[in-house]
Amino acid sequence: MVESTTSTSKDDIPSLMTAAHQNGYGEAFDVLTLAYEVPVPRQLSSNQILVRVYAASINPIDWKLLN
């Protein structure tokens, strides 16, 4: 299996992203907020990277911990 890596210049990084925030414990519809226009972090330290995520899932135990 061959692994692929891609580097991106700062000009290719969008200025806004979509983010999900958990604001406490309880039913998912009550504590999860979806924000569509959150600024993408621009100031990263020398030991940080920015990762583009196309899709993500929720681990079943994390889903249960919402309550």
Image: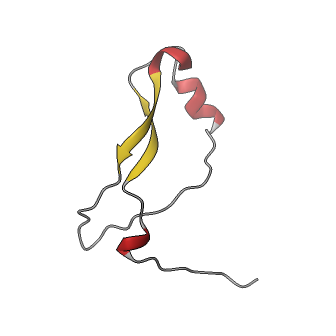
Outermost residue toward the bottom? 2
Above or below residue 38? Residue 33 is above
Assign the N terminus to one quadrant of the image: bottom right
Task: Give the residue drawn at x 36%, y 43%.
Answer: 38
Q: Position of residue 56 (x, y in %)?
A: 61, 47
Q: Position of residue 18 (x, y in %)?
A: 47, 43
For the residue pair 30 and 36, the one nearer the viewer reads as: 36
The answer to whether residue 44 is left or right of residue 49 is: left
**Left-right relation of 43 to 4:** left
Give how far across and how far down residue 51 sits, in percent. Answer: 46, 63
Relative horizontal placement of residue 52, taking residue 57 as reference (left or right): left
Q: Which residue is depicted at the point 39% across and 21% down?
A: 24
Q: As displayed, is residue 41 above or below residue 56?
A: below
- Asked which quadrant contains residue 57, the reply is top right
Indicate whether 30 appears above or below 64. Answer: above
- Furthest toward the right, the residue is 1
Q: State how the image is colored.
A: secondary structure
Tag count: 0
Q: Residue at x 31, y 56 (%)?
A: 41
Q: Which residue is at 54% across, 56% downward?
A: 53
